Amino acid sequence: MIIKVRVIPRARQDKVTVNEDGTVRVHTVAVPADGQANEAIIRMLAKYYDVPKTRIKIIRGQTSRDKVIEF
């Protein structure tokens, strides 16, 4: 499955929401430095979709707020 994700770093709390158009929004308290936000996103999506973290891969947007995730 491939999904589009919009990341909101430095949020007040960690949460995952899905917009009406199907875009997933991931709010994370992690800062976007040294890949900390990407690691937090993978961890949160694994929990939300109940899949192992090793099956989630960022295929586009490593340094962007808009990402394409495959799992």
Image (spheres, rainbow, N blue to C red):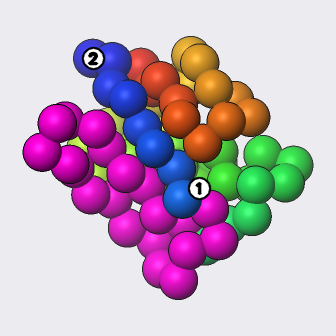
Name which residue lies at 17% across and 36% down: 21
Query: In this rendering, is residue 10 above or below 38?
Result: below
Q: What x and y, as percent, mark residue 17? A: 27, 57
Observer able to see residue 38: yes
Determine the secondary structure under disc 2.
loop
Residue 14 vs residue 71: left or right?
right
Residue 62 lies in the magenta-colored region: no
Q: What x and y, as percent, mark residue 61? A: 63, 26
Query: In this rendering, is residue 18 above or below 52?
Result: below
Give the magenta part as a residue range: 9-28
Residue 30 vs residue 40: left or right?
right
Residue farthest right in this picture: 34
Determine the secondary structure under disc 1.
helix
Disc with the residue nearer the chain's start (1 vs 2):
2
The residue that disc 1 covers is 40
Work out which quarter of the rendered image holds the C terminus and state it.
top left
Count the labels in the image.
2
Name which residue lies at 62% across and 62% down: 9
Residue farthest bottom in this picture: 12
Q: Nearer the viewer, residue 26 or 19?
A: 19
Residue 24 lies in the magenta-colored region: yes
Q: Are marks 1 and 2 in contact (CB under 8 Å)?
A: no
Work out which quarter of the rendered image holds the N terminus and state it.
top left
The residue that disc 2 covers is 1
Per the picture, the main secondary structure of the magenta-coloured stretch is: loop
Identify the amino acid type marked 2.
Answer: Met
Query: What distance separates the C-alpha of mark 1 from that of mark 2?
Result: 20 Å
Identify the amino acid type marked 1.
Answer: Ala
Name which residue lies at 46% across and 71% down: 14
Q: What x and y, as percent, mark residue 52? A: 40, 37
Tell me the number on the disc at residue 64. none
Query: In this rendering, is residue 63 above or below 50?
Result: above
